Amino acid sequence: MEANFMYCTFKGRKSVCPILLSKEQALEGIRRLARQIAADYARAAIHLVIALKGAKTTAGYLAKELDELGMTFQVDGVRVKSYAGTESTGKLNWLQELAEPDLAGKHVLVVEDIIDSGYTLSELLKVLKFRYGKPASIRTVALLDKPSRRRPELKGFKADYTGFEIQDVFVVGFGLDWDEEGRELPNIVYINPEDFINPSTN
Ligand code: 5GP
Ligand code: MG
Protein backbone atom coordinates (compact mmCIF):
# COMPACT_ATOMS: atom_id res chain seq x y z
CA MET A 1 0.00 0.00 0.00
CA GLU A 2 1.26 3.42 -0.87
CA ALA A 3 1.23 5.75 2.09
CA ASN A 4 2.74 8.97 3.29
CA PHE A 5 3.81 9.17 6.87
CA MET A 6 4.22 11.78 9.55
CA TYR A 7 5.66 11.74 13.03
CA CYS A 8 3.19 11.72 15.87
CA THR A 9 3.53 11.41 19.61
CA PHE A 10 1.08 9.70 21.91
CA LYS A 11 1.44 8.68 25.55
CA GLY A 12 4.85 10.37 25.52
CA ARG A 13 6.12 8.10 22.76
CA LYS A 14 6.98 9.13 19.21
CA SER A 15 6.28 6.97 16.16
CA VAL A 16 5.56 7.28 12.46
CA CYS A 17 1.91 7.29 11.53
CA PRO A 18 0.55 6.54 8.06
CA ILE A 19 -1.53 9.37 6.64
CA LEU A 20 -4.98 8.19 5.62
CA LEU A 21 -6.21 11.55 4.38
CA SER A 22 -4.17 14.71 4.10
CA LYS A 23 -5.67 17.95 5.35
CA GLU A 24 -6.16 18.99 1.70
CA GLN A 25 -8.09 15.80 0.97
CA ALA A 26 -10.24 16.26 4.07
CA LEU A 27 -10.99 19.85 3.04
CA GLU A 28 -11.86 18.79 -0.49
CA GLY A 29 -14.29 16.24 0.98
CA ILE A 30 -15.87 18.91 3.17
CA ARG A 31 -16.22 21.22 0.17
CA ARG A 32 -18.04 18.45 -1.70
CA LEU A 33 -20.35 17.87 1.30
CA ALA A 34 -21.09 21.59 1.55
CA ARG A 35 -22.09 21.72 -2.12
CA GLN A 36 -24.47 18.78 -1.68
CA ILE A 37 -25.96 20.30 1.47
CA ALA A 38 -26.40 23.72 -0.15
CA ALA A 39 -28.13 22.13 -3.14
CA ASP A 40 -30.48 20.05 -0.94
CA TYR A 41 -31.49 22.77 1.50
CA ALA A 42 -31.94 25.40 -1.17
CA ARG A 43 -32.27 28.64 0.80
CA ALA A 44 -33.54 27.16 4.08
CA ALA A 45 -31.66 28.19 7.23
CA ILE A 46 -29.82 25.32 8.89
CA HIS A 47 -29.22 24.66 12.57
CA LEU A 48 -25.88 22.90 12.87
CA VAL A 49 -25.50 20.71 15.94
CA ILE A 50 -21.87 19.71 16.37
CA ALA A 51 -21.06 16.46 18.14
CA LEU A 52 -18.24 17.81 20.32
CA LYS A 53 -15.40 17.65 20.62
CA GLY A 54 -14.30 15.51 17.71
CA ALA A 55 -16.41 17.15 15.01
CA LYS A 56 -15.35 20.71 15.84
CA THR A 57 -12.70 20.89 13.12
CA THR A 58 -14.98 19.38 10.48
CA ALA A 59 -17.85 21.66 11.51
CA GLY A 60 -15.64 24.75 11.42
CA TYR A 61 -14.56 24.13 7.84
CA LEU A 62 -18.06 23.02 6.85
CA ALA A 63 -19.52 26.26 8.24
CA LYS A 64 -16.97 28.28 6.27
CA GLU A 65 -17.89 26.47 3.04
CA LEU A 66 -21.63 26.83 3.67
CA ASP A 67 -21.14 30.51 4.31
CA GLU A 68 -19.28 30.92 1.03
CA LEU A 69 -22.17 29.16 -0.72
CA GLY A 70 -24.54 31.76 0.72
CA MET A 71 -26.23 29.49 3.26
CA THR A 72 -27.70 30.83 6.50
CA PHE A 73 -27.01 28.80 9.59
CA GLN A 74 -26.69 28.80 13.35
CA VAL A 75 -24.20 26.71 15.25
CA ASP A 76 -24.63 24.85 18.53
CA GLY A 77 -23.13 21.72 20.00
CA VAL A 78 -23.67 18.81 22.31
CA ARG A 79 -20.90 16.85 23.92
CA VAL A 80 -21.44 13.14 24.08
CA LYS A 81 -18.93 10.42 24.64
CA SER A 82 -19.16 6.74 23.87
CA TYR A 83 -15.51 5.87 23.42
CA ALA A 84 -12.94 5.01 26.06
CA GLY A 85 -9.43 4.68 24.64
CA THR A 86 -9.83 3.11 21.21
CA GLU A 87 -12.99 1.12 21.99
CA SER A 88 -16.68 1.91 22.01
CA THR A 89 -18.24 1.45 25.44
CA GLY A 90 -21.75 1.01 24.05
CA LYS A 91 -23.06 3.72 26.37
CA LEU A 92 -23.70 7.35 25.53
CA ASN A 93 -22.64 9.83 28.18
CA TRP A 94 -24.06 13.33 27.91
CA LEU A 95 -21.35 15.76 28.97
CA GLN A 96 -22.85 18.95 27.58
CA GLU A 97 -26.32 19.97 26.44
CA LEU A 98 -27.18 22.45 23.69
CA ALA A 99 -26.45 26.06 24.63
CA GLU A 100 -29.80 27.12 23.11
CA PRO A 101 -32.10 24.19 23.82
CA ASP A 102 -34.82 24.95 21.28
CA LEU A 103 -34.86 22.97 18.06
CA ALA A 104 -38.60 23.29 17.43
CA GLY A 105 -39.31 23.92 13.76
CA LYS A 106 -35.62 24.04 12.85
CA HIS A 107 -33.77 22.23 10.08
CA VAL A 108 -31.22 20.43 12.22
CA LEU A 109 -28.04 19.12 10.67
CA VAL A 110 -25.94 17.06 13.08
CA VAL A 111 -22.22 17.16 12.36
CA GLU A 112 -20.23 14.10 13.43
CA ASP A 113 -16.57 13.33 12.88
CA ILE A 114 -16.78 9.58 12.39
CA ILE A 115 -19.26 6.72 12.49
CA ASP A 116 -17.99 3.39 13.74
CA SER A 117 -20.54 1.04 15.34
CA GLY A 118 -23.22 3.64 14.58
CA TYR A 119 -24.30 3.75 18.21
CA THR A 120 -23.34 7.35 19.03
CA LEU A 121 -25.05 9.02 16.11
CA SER A 122 -28.14 6.82 16.16
CA GLU A 123 -28.66 7.43 19.91
CA LEU A 124 -27.95 11.13 19.52
CA LEU A 125 -30.57 11.33 16.78
CA LYS A 126 -33.20 9.62 18.92
CA VAL A 127 -32.67 12.18 21.66
CA LEU A 128 -32.46 15.23 19.38
CA LYS A 129 -35.82 14.33 17.87
CA PHE A 130 -37.69 15.16 21.08
CA ARG A 131 -35.54 16.59 23.87
CA TYR A 132 -35.43 20.16 22.59
CA GLY A 133 -38.77 20.41 20.79
CA LYS A 134 -39.73 18.93 17.45
CA PRO A 135 -37.33 19.89 14.63
CA ALA A 136 -38.77 20.55 11.15
CA SER A 137 -36.17 18.13 9.81
CA ILE A 138 -33.10 16.37 11.08
CA ARG A 139 -30.21 15.12 8.99
CA THR A 140 -26.66 14.05 9.64
CA VAL A 141 -23.26 14.64 8.13
CA ALA A 142 -20.19 12.58 9.00
CA LEU A 143 -16.71 13.26 7.68
CA LEU A 144 -15.65 9.62 8.03
CA ASP A 145 -17.47 6.32 8.15
CA LYS A 146 -16.30 2.78 8.89
CA PRO A 147 -19.26 0.78 7.55
CA SER A 148 -17.56 -2.56 8.28
CA ARG A 149 -17.76 -1.79 12.01
CA ARG A 150 -21.51 -1.34 12.22
CA ARG A 151 -23.42 -3.13 14.99
CA PRO A 152 -25.58 -5.86 13.46
CA GLU A 153 -28.79 -4.08 14.44
CA LEU A 154 -27.54 -0.85 12.83
CA LYS A 155 -26.45 -2.43 9.56
CA GLY A 156 -27.32 0.00 6.79
CA PHE A 157 -27.35 3.00 9.15
CA LYS A 158 -25.55 5.87 7.45
CA ALA A 159 -25.25 9.60 7.69
CA ASP A 160 -27.25 11.54 5.10
CA TYR A 161 -23.95 13.05 3.95
CA THR A 162 -20.72 11.06 4.21
CA GLY A 163 -17.28 12.46 3.43
CA PHE A 164 -15.19 9.30 3.17
CA GLU A 165 -15.74 5.61 3.80
CA ILE A 166 -12.64 4.13 5.41
CA GLN A 167 -11.34 0.76 6.54
CA ASP A 168 -11.47 -0.54 10.08
CA VAL A 169 -8.57 1.50 11.47
CA PHE A 170 -8.34 3.85 14.44
CA VAL A 171 -7.78 7.37 13.16
CA VAL A 172 -6.63 10.56 14.84
CA GLY A 173 -6.01 14.13 13.76
CA PHE A 174 -8.21 16.82 12.21
CA GLY A 175 -10.08 17.06 15.53
CA LEU A 176 -10.15 13.35 16.30
CA ASP A 177 -8.35 12.27 19.46
CA TRP A 178 -6.94 9.30 21.23
CA ASP A 179 -7.59 10.01 24.92
CA GLU A 180 -7.47 13.76 24.19
CA GLU A 181 -4.19 13.56 22.29
CA GLY A 182 -3.69 14.13 18.57
CA ARG A 183 -6.62 16.44 17.81
CA GLU A 184 -4.26 19.13 16.52
CA LEU A 185 -2.60 16.90 13.90
CA PRO A 186 -3.44 18.50 10.54
CA ASN A 187 -3.76 15.25 8.63
CA ILE A 188 -5.91 12.25 9.43
CA VAL A 189 -3.54 9.46 10.38
CA TYR A 190 -4.18 5.98 11.60
CA ILE A 191 -2.46 4.46 14.55
CA ASN A 192 -1.75 1.15 16.04
CA PRO A 193 -2.13 1.83 19.77
CA GLU A 194 0.42 -0.88 20.57
CA ASP A 195 3.14 1.17 18.88
CA PHE A 196 2.76 3.67 21.67
CA ILE A 197 2.03 1.41 24.60
CA ASN A 198 4.29 -1.56 24.04
CA PRO A 199 7.90 -0.45 23.38
CA SER A 200 8.92 -3.84 21.96
CA THR A 201 6.85 -3.25 18.83
CA ASN A 202 8.64 0.03 17.99
P1 5GP B 1 -19.72 4.75 17.29
O1 5GP B 1 -20.66 5.09 18.39
O2 5GP B 1 -20.29 4.92 15.92
O3 5GP B 1 -19.13 3.37 17.50
O4 5GP B 1 -18.47 5.69 17.44
C1 5GP B 1 -18.54 7.01 17.12
C2 5GP B 1 -17.71 7.88 18.02
O5 5GP B 1 -16.58 7.18 18.51
C3 5GP B 1 -17.17 9.04 17.24
O6 5GP B 1 -17.96 10.18 17.48
C4 5GP B 1 -15.78 9.22 17.78
O7 5GP B 1 -15.82 10.11 18.86
C5 5GP B 1 -15.39 7.86 18.27
N1 5GP B 1 -14.61 7.11 17.26
C6 5GP B 1 -15.02 6.08 16.49
N2 5GP B 1 -14.04 5.64 15.70
C7 5GP B 1 -12.98 6.43 15.95
C8 5GP B 1 -11.64 6.49 15.42
O8 5GP B 1 -11.21 5.73 14.54
N3 5GP B 1 -10.85 7.45 15.94
C9 5GP B 1 -11.26 8.32 16.91
N4 5GP B 1 -10.37 9.20 17.34
N5 5GP B 1 -12.49 8.30 17.42
C10 5GP B 1 -13.35 7.36 16.94
MG1 MG C 1 -17.48 12.08 17.85
Image (cartoon, helix red, strand yellow):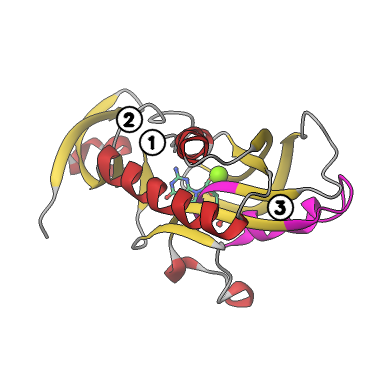
The residue that appears at 32% across and 30% down in the rendered structure is 185
Q: Which residue is mark 3?
A: 124
Q: Could you tell me how far apart the alpha carbons at marks 2 and 3 are, in whole angstroms?
A: 27 Å
- x and y percentages locating residue 60 in the rendered image: 50, 32
Q: Which stretch appears magenta?
A: 111-137
Residue 24 in the image: above or below residue 185: below
Q: Residues within 10 Å of mark 1 (few under 14, many from 20)?
A: many
Verify CB contact (< 8 Å) between mark 2 and mark 3. Answer: no
Ligand 1 has an atom within 8 Å of the beta carbon of the residue at disc 2: no
Kind of residue at disc 2: Leu
Magenta stretch holds residue 114: yes
Amino acid marked by disc 1: Phe
88 lies left or right of 163: right
Q: Farthest residue in the top direction?
A: 12
- Mark earlier in primary sequence (2, 1): 1
- Cα distance, mark 1 to mark 3? 22 Å
Q: Position of residue 48 (x, y in %)?
A: 65, 41
Residue depicted at x 60% and y 55%: 42
- Say if the magenta span includes residue 13: no
Q: Which mark is residue 198?
A: none
Mark 3 nearby-residue class (10 Å; few <14, some 14–19, many ≥20): some
Q: Distance of mark 2 from mark 1, alpha carbons?
A: 6 Å
Q: Amino acid at mark 3?
A: Leu
The local secondary structure at tag 1 comes to: loop
Identify the residue at horizontal 45%, vertical 68% (top origin).
147
Can residue 117 be seen here? The reply is no
Residue 119, image quadrant: bottom right
Spot occupied by residue 171 in the image (x, y as percentages of width and height):
36, 46
Contact, mark 1 vs mark 3 (Cβ under 8 Å): no
Residue 195 versus residue 170: which sits nearer the camera? 170
Residue corresponding to mark 1? 174
